[in-house]
Image (cartoon, rainbow, N blue to C red):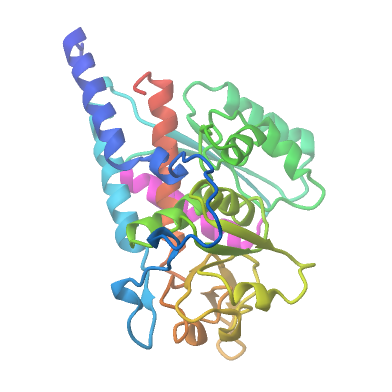
Amino acid sequence: MRTCTTSSVVALHTALKKALHSFSASCDLLGPNLPDVWVPPYNTSHSHILQTKPWSIGNNAAIFEGKAIAKHIKSKVADEISMMKSGIGKCPRLAVVLVGDRRDSHTFIQFKLKACDQVGIETMVAQLPDKCSENELLHVVAGFNDDPGVHGIIVQLPLPQHLDEEKIINIVSPKKDVDGFHPLNMGNLAKRGRKPFFIPCAPKACIALLLRNGVEIKGKRAVIIGRSKIAGLPTALLLQRHHATVSVLHAYTKKPEQITSEADIVVADVGIPNMVRHNWLKQGAVVIDMGTNQVKDPISQSFHVTGDVCFKEAVKVASAITPVPGGVGPVTISMLLSNTLDSAKHAFGLI
């Protein structure tokens, strides 16, 4: 049995804390905590002028691929987990709760499990039948809450209609809520100056893609199409934390294309294939497509994934755009790994 000296444990803790600041960077993703200082409308300082990026030149948009960013984050997560295992003999563990047989839910879970395996996160899956009772599901989640060996819990959404999603989300421990959907985490995300235990993964990926590609957010007009609790709403909150002027469109918004056509940044989260067309976009806008719609080919009967934005039209208008697949998706999964690692660090007293 391996024994660790006090000095070696301290050295490990110090190394992990240094590594944390190198990539987790939740503070950066939450945006700068700047005071509201109002200036006269005739002020023309450069901070209010839309800056032209090198990638905005030309007829076709730059493609913001997510694979390289995801690979970088996964590599850092894997390195830290390796340090954990060698230093204290422990590693993060993620519990996944899956209800029913939805094709898309099973696909997403397989991606997440594979990514966990690649970086060294242990996983356990509780799969319940589509007609399971609410009490059965609550019992499973409560068991994971009470298990000290579980550091992260995700309940794959959407749930069957007879189950109360809010009730299920609310019972997940905020300190294990690596999806970031618990009201405590969402509430702290909404309030400047506060820090949630976890930022929801898809919005976190959206901001990472913007920041790492040099997109200025502060002072820009951003439009979120869709207000889901998984992506649209928390993305709007996160963009506000970065001092964008944010509008959130929904199913009852009148003439949404008029609003989006004035936006510097457009984020789509509606679940309707190719809904956003070229006339929805301002010339030079940055487009983040969060859509992951499985569309059946009428000829081959096979399925393929497409986004909410009509890519072939948008690429001729936007200055930059994320592809589907390969854009937000890979980064979202890597953010789940990062959140799970951070949860384990808290449990092990490393941060």
Residue 118 lies within the magenta run: yes
Q: Nearer the viewer, residue 334 or 93?
A: 334
In this view, 142 is above or below 285: above
In this view, 325 is above or below 194: below
Residue 333 lies within the magenta run: no
User: Could you tell me residue 193's position as x and y percent?
Assistant: 52, 33
- At 36% from the left and 40% from the top, the residue drawn is 25
**Figure quadrant of the C terminus:** top left
Residue furthest top as drawn = 6
User: Could you tell me residue 112's position as x and y percent?
Assistant: 46, 51
Is the stretch drawn in magenta largely helix, strand or loop? helix
In this view, 12 is above or below 288: above
Q: Nearer the viewer, residue 176 or 184?
A: 184
Part of the protein shown in magenta: 101-119
- At 64% from the left and 36% from the top, the residue drawn is 187
User: Could you tell me residue 141's position as x and y percent?
Assistant: 64, 32
Residue furthest bottom as drawn = 299
Camera sees residue 150: yes
In this view, 342 is above or below 59: above
Residue 53 relative to residue 181: left or right: left
